[in-house]
Image: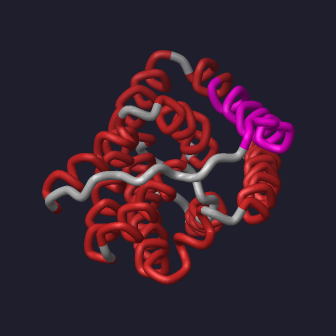
Amino acid sequence: MPETSTLLIFMLSSLALLVIPGPAVLYIVTRSVQQGRTAGLVSALGVGLGSMVHILAAAAGLSALLLSSALAFTVVKVLGAGYLLYIGIRTLLDRTPLTTEEDIPALPLGKIFAQGVVVNILNPKTALFFLAFLPQFVHPETGSPLIQILILGSCFVVLGVFSDSMYALLAGWLGKRLRKNQTFLRRQKYFAGSIYMALGVVAVGLKESH
């Protein structure tokens, strides 16, 4: 079981990360705007299940890595902290032209849920992020790493579904304006990059204190 302080820092870091409007959030907003809030909420649940698949894979892989080599696990944590800083800097420096979402066809709720799962499972950046983020909060000396990863991962998914659901509920009257607002899209890039870099700094601090 993760320590209370570790769990609190993890939850605060997760919330900071989850408010960043990424591809999954834009997909949820698009569904909610074009097909109603119910469709947005269903897509949020699908994205959450997709995250759980990544977390289970990360738990299995990281646990096996720790059993084989504590040093290798430490290296993964160091590289993970570096990766968080890297994607923060890359986000800040990104010069990709801003675009808005294309219209997407209406679908039954079952297909929307499945599409949300697939959107997140097939995103390699999601898998790489979990491998960089979760290990920073795992401390083998306090208990089973597998249990810690599953608890932390479950907390992340619950917080993610809650955060995404808020986007879905708001998207009906605000989401379309945000997706077409170039000023918002430009500024959220700097916000997102700053959050990633802050998480990298937090990860470095966690390693120094343990």
Depth order, front residue of 119/178: 178
- Is 137 drawn above or below residue 140 in the view shown? below
The location of residue 194, given as percent across then percent down, is 82, 54
Main secondary structure type of the part rendered in magenta: helix
Which quadrant would residue 195 be assigned to in this image? bottom right
The answer, for residue 22, to whether it is visible in the render is yes
**Is residue 91 part of the magenta span, yes or no?**
yes
- Is 56 drawn above or below residue 152 in the view shown? above
Depth order, front residue of 178/93: 178
Residue drawn 22% across and 55% down? 113
Colour convention of the picture: secondary structure
Residue drawn 42% across and 73% down? 168
Residue drawn 31% across and 75% down? 36
The answer, for residue 9, to whether it is visible in the render is no
Residue drawn 40% across and 56% down? 151
The location of residue 190, given as percent across then percent down, is 82, 54
- Give the extent of the magenta segment: 76-97
- Is 102 drawn above or below residue 53 in the view shown? below
**Is residue 84 part of the magenta span, yes or no?**
yes
Relative to residue 128, is residue 148 drawn left or right?
left
Depth order, front residue of 156/70: 156
The location of residue 96, given as percent across then percent down, is 74, 36
**Screen quadrant of the N terminus:** bottom left
The location of residue 140, given as percent across then percent down, is 53, 40
**Number of marks drawn:** 0
- Is 142 drawn above or below residue 53 in the view shown? below
